[in-house]
Amino acid sequence: MFAGMFTVLVCSVSTAVRPAHAETVKFRIAETVQVKGKDLPYTLFVSLKDAGETRLGMDAFLDLRSLQDLAPWLFSSVLKETCQQKFALAVSQVSAQADALVAEGQVQAKFYACDTDDPKTHYRGVLLFGQNVDVMIKASAAVERNCLHLRLEDVELDLQGFVGTVSDMIGLTEKARLLILEKAAEVLAENPVCPELPSELKGLEPRFTSGGIREIGSGGVGAALSGSVDTSAGTLLDLIAALQEKQGFGVVE
C-alpha cells in the first residue's frame, strides 16, 4: 500500500535498494556517533514492509565493525586508583558470539607502599606487588525505550600458577571482579545503542520492540532492532512537507 510512496521518499535521503517485491523497501544510511569527542562511523540498514493500515513494519540493522576495531581505545580504562593500589582494564579485543558481546583483555593490579604520615598529602612509594589477570566479559542486549541496552551477563577471571595463588589469597580476584561489575555496568548503562534515522524519517515515530546483538561473519559486531513506524495520513503529510522544504519544492497554496 505504501511501498511506492516510500521508494520515492527514501531515494531523497539515502541510497535506496530496489525492493524485491512491491511491499518491501530497503535502504542504507551512513551515520556517525560521537565517542570520547570523536565522530566514529557506522552503517544503518533499514527495511520497511507493509504491516497494517496505519503502521509499517521496520527492521533496523547496525553494522558496528568500524567501532569494534577501536575497542581497545574505547573500553580500556583505569577502574580504581589510590595511593596504595591501581586497577586498570586493558581490553585487547571485542567480538560478537551469536547474540552476545564478548570483551577480552587483562586486569592490571598494582599495590604500592604509601606514606600516610601527612593526612593532607599521601606519597606513593615502591611497587610492592603486581599481577595481570586475564579477563573475559560477556554482555547481552535488550530493547528498551527504542534503544538497545547492553547488560553484563558474566565475568571470567583467569589466575594461574604460584602468583595467581598468592593473588587469590589476598582477595585480588574478588576485588577485580567487583570493580569490573561496577564499572562495566555504569559504562553499559550510559551508552545504549540508539539508531538515528534521518530527520526526514523521524516523524514516522519508530517504535522498536525487540532486538539484540548479531554476529556478522566470524566475530563481527552488529545489532538488530525490529518494530514499526507510523504511517497515518497526518504523519505522511508532515513527511512530504519536510521533503518538499529540503528539496526546494514549492507548496501550492
Image (cartoon, grey):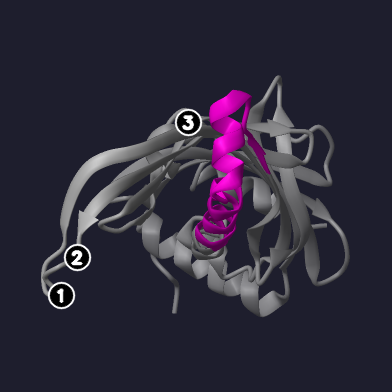
In depth, the one of 156 and 99 nearer the eye is: 156
Q: Are marks 1 and 2 in contact (CB under 8 Å)?
A: yes
Magenta: main secondary structure equals helix
**Mark 1: which secondary structure?**
loop
Span of residues in magenta: 156-185
Q: Which residue is drawn at 50% across and 59% down?
A: 183
- Residue 251 position in % (x across, y down): 43, 70
Q: Given the current orientation, which residue lies at the most extreme right position?
A: 52
Q: Is residue 188 above or below residue 144?
A: above
Distance from Cα at disc 2 to Cα at disc 3: 46 Å
In the rendered image, which residue does mark 3 sit on? 66
Q: Can residue 152 be found in the magenta stretch?
A: no
In the rendered image, which residue does mark 2 sit on? 116
Within 10 Å of disc 2 (Cα), the crowding (few <14, some 14-19, many 20+) is few
Q: Which amino acid does label 3 sit on?
A: Ser
Where residue 65 sits, quadrant-wise, is top right
Q: Is residue 156 above or below residue 233?
A: above
Distance from Cα at disc 1 to Cα at disc 2: 6 Å
Within 10 Å of disc 3 (Cα), the crowding (few <14, some 14-19, many 20+) is some
In the rendered image, which residue does mark 1 sit on? 119
Asked if residue 81 can be seen in this view, the reply is yes
Q: In this view, does 26 lie above or below 132?
A: below
The earlier-in-sequence mark between 2 and 3 is 3
In depth, the one of 24 and 160 nearer the eye is: 160
The earlier-in-sequence mark between 3 and 1 is 3
Distance from Cα at disc 3 to Cα at disc 1: 48 Å
**Mark 2: which secondary structure?**
loop
**Mark 3: which secondary structure?**
helix
Q: What residue type is labelled 2?
A: Thr
